[in-house]
Amino acid sequence: MIRGKFITLEGGEGVGKTTNLAFIKSCLEQYKVTVTLTREPGGTELAEKLRQLLLNKDGEAISEQAELLMIFAARAQHIKHVIEPALAKGNWVLCDRFTDATYAYQGGGRNINRCSIEWLENLVQKKLKPDLTILLDAPIEIGLARAKKRANLDRFESEKTIFFEQVRQSYLFQAAQYPERIKLIKADQPLTLVQNELAEIIETFF
Ligand code: T5A
């Protein structure tokens, strides 16, 4: 059995990840691959419970370190029960956010040093890395304005502007570090143009 490929979709709040996931899945399916669609934090029963705790803005304040560990705890479950089994049976895994989000949100946004994240990444992921990452990037005011159209803002969406600026800069830093893997799309264009670029990236990848 040929191992599947692992594709991740990244970006700040409201850049259009959820909107474009189904489109990317349909692009992949044109090449006759079976796609497992999943997300982080989440993807398993326990990881989804951790997601709820992470996004809930009421109750006890979550420390930066606890947040980081909860994210990697969820990721460990997700890899063991969903991502690795799917890849092993030849499925392609399309994941809404993965460890680049941790470098952006916990590293950039919360100022946790890169070495700590790298250490947990090695512990939890071993050799697993995305084969392709698509980063949707837009000025934060555009993404936040889109996200704010929804009724309730979660714990991350309720952060201050500086937090989102640091998240965005960290994502751009990741993209500059790994230009072969991370493909950047300007997400403040009309959706049809974003999707034209997505289709081109998928075609080139194949
Ligand atoms: N997190 C996650 C961490 O801190 N560390 C980690 O390691 C991980 C994995 C998860 C939260 O967890 C944090 C980061 C996150 O805050 P989430 O639900 O995955 O949350 O992420 P969100 O960014 O909150 O998801 P959103 O739904 O807000 O953003 P999306 O999915 O990027 O945006 P989407 O598709 O819902 O679009 C928002 C609106 O914009 C419109 C859509 O129609 C929609 O109304 N839109 C466009 N409008 C015009 N032009 C375009 N090109 C458009 N594209 C979309």
Image (cartoon, rainbow, N blue to C red):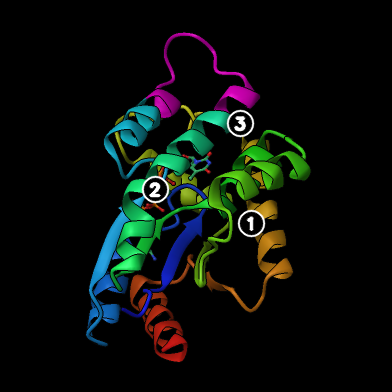
Q: Is residue 18 visible?
A: no
Q: Can you say which quadrant of the picture contains the C terminus?
A: bottom left
Mark 3 vs mark 2, foreground winner is 2
Residue type marked 2:
Lys
User: If you read the primary sequence from the N terminus, does the residue marked by circle 1 or circle 2 appear first?
Assistant: 2
User: If you read the primary sequence from the N terminus, does the residue marked by circle 3 or circle 2 appear first?
Assistant: 2
Question: What residue span does the magenta drawing correspond to?
Answer: 53-67
Q: Are marks 1 and 3 in contact (CB under 8 Å)?
A: no
At horizontal 77% and vertical 44% (from top left) the residue drawn is 115
Residue type marked 3:
Lys
Residue that badge 1 annotates: 171
Q: Is residue 160 visible?
A: yes
Residue that badge 3 annotates: 160
Marks 3/2: CA distance? 34 Å
Marks 1/3: CA distance? 17 Å
Q: Position of residue 69 (x, y in %)?
A: 57, 30
Mark 1 vs mark 2, foreground winner is 2
Where is 87 relative to 83, above or below?
below
